[in-house]
Every structure is written in C-alpha cells, then in structure tokens.
Image (cartoon, rainbow, N blue to C red):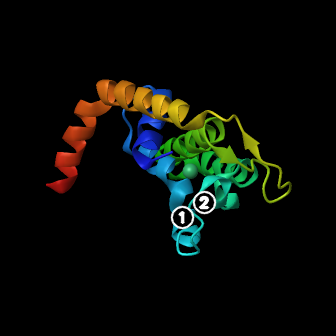
C-alpha cells in the first residue's frame, strides 16, 4: 500500500490523531531504500524482513517495553508500525514469517479490491483526521 494509506489506516485504528503513530506507520517502508535500488518493486519482494511479523513483533515489543522510560511516543510508534504490517498483510502479498519461513500469503484482492480498500481508507481517514493533518502540517512548516 502507499504511504498515505498506511498513515491514515494507522490513525483510523488509533482513533485519534497522533504524529508518532504516523511516524511508526511509515517506518516499515524504510527498507524500500534497500529494495528499490535493487529494482525489487513488487509484491513481497519490495519488503525485507523488517516489514514482516517476526521482526515487527520484537521491534514493537522493545518499543512498548521502553515506552514507560522514554515516553508514550514510543508506544505510539509501535502501534503505527504494527498497523503497517497488518495492512500489508491484508492488502498485499507478504512472506509473513520471513526470515524463518519463505511461504507467501496473498488474499488476492486484485487491483479493483486494492483500489477500493485504498479509497475507503483515504475517504474515512481524511474525513476523520484531514483537519488535524492540515493544521499540524502547517505548524511543522512554520
Ligand atoms: Zn509496506
């Protein structure tokens, strides 16, 4: 899924606007900096193990564990991170247990199904949080 869908999906699940949830929801796609130059753009190949359940679980557990010491923003990031894994799992082809198992999971939504899901997320997310995103964007830019 695209980054905007990931950010909005995370906010919808979180049920309130939180910049750290957005940050966390974008983190799993950092591995695209590694896969894109290798021309691995599609399906489960576009992710590495950091976008799958075993690493995500450990990372999210670590963030949640550290959250009481460093601040609730770590828990928000963990929540956003997990929402990314969930959406990719539901909407795309993943190898959910990489690096331990290479089996693929794909619910075969098809292009129309993915577009409908993305459109629903954009519509619901922007309706609920568009105003706050606009305001905090303006605040960040000064
Ligand atoms: Zn992803």
Q: Residues within 10 Å of mark 1 (few under 14, many from 20)?
A: some
| Residue 46: assigned label | 2
Give the percent coordinates (x, y) of residue 120: 43, 26
73 versus 45 height, above or below: above
Q: Quadrant of the C terminus?
A: bottom left
Within 8 Å: ligand 1 and the Cβ of disc 2?
Answer: yes
Residue at the location (54% across, 43% down)? 75
**Residue positioned most to the right:** 101
Looking at the rendered structure, the secondary structure element under dot 2 is helix
* Secondary element at tag 1: helix
* Residue farthest toward the bottom in the current orientation of the protein: 37
Q: Which residue is mark 1?
A: 32
Question: For this rendering, which residue is in front, 109 or 77?
Answer: 109
Mark 1 CB lies closer than 8 A to ligand 1: yes
> Left or right of 103: which side holds 140?
left
Cβ atoms at labels 1 and 2 below 8 Å apart: yes
Q: CA distance from mark 1 to mark 2?
A: 7 Å
Which residue sits at x=78%, y=56%?
98
**Residue nearest the observer in this picture, 13 or 107:** 107
Q: Is residue 105 left or right of residue 44?
A: right
Residue under the image location 39 percent in, 38 percent down:
18
Q: Relative to residue 4, is residue 100 depicted above or below? A: below
- Residue 14 seen from this side: no
Which-is-in-front pick, marks 1 and 2?
2
First along the sequence among labels 1 and 2: 1
Residue 44 percent location from the top left of the image: 67, 54
Q: Position of residue 103 (x, y in %)?
A: 83, 50
């Amino acid at each position: 899924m695209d980054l905007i869908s990931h950010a909005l999906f995370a906010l919808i699940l979180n049920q309130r606007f939180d910049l750290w949830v957005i940050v966390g929801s974008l983190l799993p796609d950092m591995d695209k900096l590694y896969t894109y130059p290798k021309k691995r753009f599609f399906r489960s190949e576009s992710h590495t193990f950091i976008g799958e359940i075993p690493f995500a679980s450990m990372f999210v557990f670590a963030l949640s564990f550290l959250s009481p010491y460093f601040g609730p923003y770590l828990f928000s990031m963990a929540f956003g991170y997990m929402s990314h894994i969930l959406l990719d799992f539901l909407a795309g082809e993943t190898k959910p247990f990489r690096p331990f198992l290479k089996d693929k999971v794909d619910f075969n939504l098809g292009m129309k199904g993915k577009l409908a899901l993305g459109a629903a997320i954009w519509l619901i997310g922007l309706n609920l949080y568009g105003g706050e995103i606009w305001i905090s964007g303006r605040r960040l830019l000064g």
